[in-house]
Image (cartoon, helix red, strand yellow):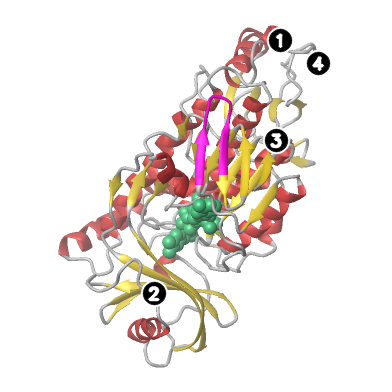
């Protein structure tokens, strides 16, 4: 038995586990990731990075390596329930208003590489089989490897072994249909096959008893998602055959569409479940291990990565003894409602997205499409689906508290606000010279005095490493009166323990 000691052990090197590993390694936390698969499954599963995830990746300098491997797509907004009206993110003031198409395996590969470069260790072919926790830490067994750590984070997907080993409740509802997903090569295509990635409503079709979505991912390669309109035969655990894929392709895209090969395939359902508690002692849950839902609107990978951005810095400062009391528990308090909201709106989309809507659902789709043409409704759903409207219910008086900060340019265009977060630190941004020079801040809060090209709605803001405002002030008096208390509430133990730091 090989023994490893570390600070955090992560089960699963999917998008959630690799993002978390990066965040922890960036903060200097010893991190070991145990991944069941001995090599990465090259399956195009989650393919859409939503605008808010893109902003978070940008803040760490991780977006560029992903953009360089993104699949070309039309500059068109996302969708709600496949309705034919693009969601317009421009009212949310973002530099990334459109979903970005990057195969999930590429996301994992890039993030894993970056995490390892920062010092994380990823062990492939190590399936977690046992977990024991006590007051001081956790012991995790994976084959002949035993890892002792202060915390375990379960990022091991919808069928989470860790969740099952702990007997953590995963209430919800089973799936109502079984769909299949396949990466295919086509040697010939009919005029019905999409030539480019445009709006979702142009990528989906229903014909001859099947529904399908076909996404061109480069050359003769496509990502095919399909199922039967009348769900009678498919079983979750039945292997996906080439014959079945060819039949579905012909049914939806005609005889001229010819299957040349299948790279990978799997089945999925629209099961909807969420763990009751994101923390069980020294074990935390993130990503699909914490929540599963129908795959409408490209939400799962994004919610999981955003779980990781929320959890990473909290876990790091807790381990380093720099956290205010209860900081780690705010992970559940903040992220459980976000997961519940995703379950809620994907359930609504399940009804509207029906491949062959009956009269009532067709009427609902018409009415919803009209509503989406109204700017306020479109803005609301664009904010929801892109993650840009997400805010947390944080203590604090100022209206900006809990909200995300748009990425504005600073100092007459010399840098972007997002670039201040490369180190994963919190930032005290002083836009009007109101923060006193003798302010006392812990070393991991960077004081930045700058000029903003646009009005952010406050003269100074304290921004968490995950880009959410936890304090703001409009003038020097408000700053003097409330800043120290805000630092102690959100980011650091007690003001009197803080080192003096020059302005
Ligand atoms: C058809 C379809 C399309 C989708 N499209 C999108 C999309 O466009 N955008 C989007 O945001 N989401 C999408 N999703 C959802 C997305 O794929 C998932 O939400 C995402 O994979 C969750 O990431 P994760 O890291 O939490 O879990 P996973 O990706 O499931 O990763 C879990 C990892 O843990 C490993 N593991 C499992 N058990 C163990 C164990 N015992 N020990 C160690 N390791 C273990 C697994 O091998 C895996 O590598 C889609 C899903 C489907 C089915």
Q: Position of residue 179 (x, y in %)?
A: 35, 68
**Dot 2 or dot 3, earlier in sequence:** 3
Q: Residues within 10 Å of mark 3 (few under 14, many from 20)?
A: many
Q: SS class of the residue under badge 1?
A: helix
Which residues are the magenta region? Answer: 130-140
Instruction: Give whichever of 169, 482 is nearer the camera.
Output: 169
Mark 1 or mark 4, whichever is nearer to me = 1
Magenta segment's dominant SS is strand
Residue 224: x and y in percent read 44, 74
Q: Which residue is mark 2?
A: 239
The Cα–Cα distance between marks 2 and 3, rounded to whole angstroms, is: 41 Å
- Position of residue 185 relative to residue 433, above or below, is below
User: Which residue in the protein does label 1 denote?
Assistant: 497
Mark 2 residue element: loop
Residue marked by disc 3? 29
Is the CB–ligand 1 distance for label 1 below 8 Å? no
């Amino acid at each position: 038995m090989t023994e490893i000691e570390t600070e955090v052990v992560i089960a699963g090197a999917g998008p959630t586990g690799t993002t978390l590993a990066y965040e922890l390694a960036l903060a200097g936390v010893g991190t070991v990731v145990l991944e069941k698969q001995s090599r990465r499954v090259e399956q195009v599963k989650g393919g859409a990075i939503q605008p808010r995830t893109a902003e978070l990746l940008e803040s760490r300098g991780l977006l560029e390596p992903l953009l360089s491997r993104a699949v070309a797509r039309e500059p068109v907004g996302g969708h709600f329930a496949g309705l034919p009206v693009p969601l317009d993110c421009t009212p949310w003031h973002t530099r990334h208003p459109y979903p970005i198409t990057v195969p999930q395996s590429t996301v994992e590969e890039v993030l894993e590489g970056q995490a390892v470069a920062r010092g994380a260790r990823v062990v492939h072919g190590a399936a977690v089989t046992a977990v024991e926790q006590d007051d001081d830490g956790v012991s995790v067994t994976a084959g002949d490897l035993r890892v002792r750590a202060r915390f375990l984070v379960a990022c091991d997907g919808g069928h989470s072994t860790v969740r099952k080993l702990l007997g953590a409740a995963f209430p919800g509802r089973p799936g109502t249909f079984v769909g299949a997903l396949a990466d295919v090569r086509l040697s010939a295509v009919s005029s019905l096959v999409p030539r480019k990635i445009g709006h979702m409503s142009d990528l989906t079709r229903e014909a001859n008893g099947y529904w399908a979505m076909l996404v061109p991912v480069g050359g003769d390669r496509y990502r095919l998602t399909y199922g039967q309109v009348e769900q009678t035969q498919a079983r979750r655990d039945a292997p996906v055959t080439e014959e079945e894929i060819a039949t579905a392709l012909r049914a939806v895209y005609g005889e001229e569409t010819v299957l040349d090969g299948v790279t990978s395939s799997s089945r999925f359902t629209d099961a909807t479940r969420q763990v009751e508690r994101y923390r069980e002692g020294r074990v935390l849950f993130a990503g699909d291990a914490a929540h599963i839902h129908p795959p409408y609107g490209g939400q799962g990978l994004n919610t999981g990565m955003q779980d990781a951005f929320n959890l990473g810095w909290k876990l790091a400062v807790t381990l380093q003894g720099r956290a205010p009391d209860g900081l780690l528990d705010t992970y559940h308090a903040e992220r459980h409602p976000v997961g519940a909201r995703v379950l809620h709106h994907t359930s609504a989309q399940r009804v509207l997205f029906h491949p062959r809507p009956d009269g009532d659902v067709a009427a609902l789709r018409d009415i919803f499409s009209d509503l989406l043409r109204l700017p306020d409704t479109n803005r609301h759903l664009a904010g929801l689906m892109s993650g840009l409207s997400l805010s947390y219910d944080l203590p604090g008086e100022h209206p900006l508290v809990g909200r995300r900060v748009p990425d504005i340019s600073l100092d007459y265009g010399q840098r972007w606000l997002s670039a201040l977060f490369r180190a994963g630190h919190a930032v005290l941004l002083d836009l009007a010279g109101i923060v006193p020079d003798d302010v006392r801040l812990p070393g991991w809060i960077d004081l930045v005095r700058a000029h903003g090209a646009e009005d952010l709605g406050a003269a100074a803001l304290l921004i968490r490493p995950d880009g959410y405002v936890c304090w703001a002030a409009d003038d020097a008096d408000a700053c003097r009166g409330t800043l120290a208390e805000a630092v102690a509430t959100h980011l650091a133990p007690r003001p009197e323990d803080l080192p003096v730091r020059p302005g």
